[in-house]
Image (tube, grey):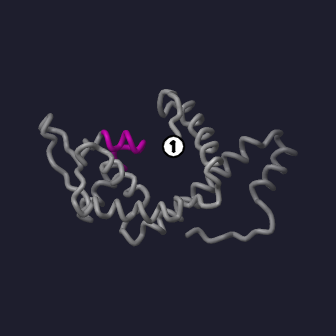
Amino acid sequence: MATPLDLPFDPIDRAGEIWESTWGPASAMRVATSVMRVQQLLLARCDEALRPYGLTFARYEALVLLRFSRRGALPMKVIGSRLMVHPTSATNTVDRLVAAGLVVRRRNPRDGRGVLAELTDRGREVVEAATAALVAIEFGLAGIAEADRAEIFGGLRRVRAAAGDFREAPVRIR
């Protein structure tokens, strides 16, 4: 887990004050810097919960993606696209899952040239247990109320849509 800094002040807020006196409005800098720091904290918390399963969050995401697929298998190019990572990163992630016996590679029967990554029975067991561990820590968000999570998701979703991650469609919040 990320080591608590236990500072007597909020360094991002302090930087914002200096920013405002130097360059003007600091709201964008404060939000962006806060998002980046929270990403570090969440990743550390999630990786700690996943460590007993031999997973990082990136590997967990790949397992979940395969678990959500109809057949438990997806083409490698789809994995990279859906995880929003470079194909090399997707390959590296799948390589590690194969080495751990959680995924196997096989030829795509639809085209004969492509490669599918397929969840093994052990991979299914691990993704279920790892998911329970992440749910137990609320993915590191235990300090944020459900209503606030929906609002935060909506705001961050708009940033991703504006960046071209996807075409905007109505939000489905459960």
Secondary structure predominantly adopted by residues drawn in magenta: helix
**Considering depth in this image, is 95 or 56 the residue closer to the camera?**
56
**Considering depth in this image, is 101 or 126 the residue closer to the camera?**
126
Vertical order, 84 against 62 (above or below):
above
Query: How far from the left and from the top, in percent, is residue 59?
Result: 37, 57
**Would residue 145 be counted in the magenta stretch?**
no
Q: Residue furthest toward the right?
A: 21
The residue beneath circle 1 is: 174
Q: Residue at x 64, y 55 (%)?
A: 144
Q: Residue at x 25, y 48 (%)?
A: 72
Q: Amino acid at mark 1?
A: Arg
Range covered by the magenta-colored residues: 78-89
Q: Residue at x 22, y 51 (%)?
A: 118
Which quadrant is the N terminus positioned in? bottom right
Vertical order, 84 against 164 (above or below):
below
Vertical order, 169 against 71 (above or below):
above
**Considering depth in this image, is 96 or 129 the residue closer to the camera?**
129
Query: How far from the left and from the top, in percent, is residue 62?
Result: 35, 52
Q: Residues within 10 Å of mark 1 (few under 14, many from 20)?
A: few
**Considering depth in this image, is 92 or 60 the residue closer to the camera?**
60
Taking the image as shown, residue 53 lies to the left or right of residue 11, namely left
For mark 1, give the secondary structure.
Answer: loop
Q: Residue at x 16, y 49 (%)?
A: 106
> Which picture quadrant has residue 24?
top right
Query: How far from the left and from the top, in percent, is residue 160?
Result: 54, 36
Query: How far from the left and from the top, in percent, is residue 104?
Result: 20, 55
Taking the image as shown, residue 62 lies to the left or right of residue 109, namely right
Taking the image as shown, residue 171 lies to the left or right of residue 73, namely right
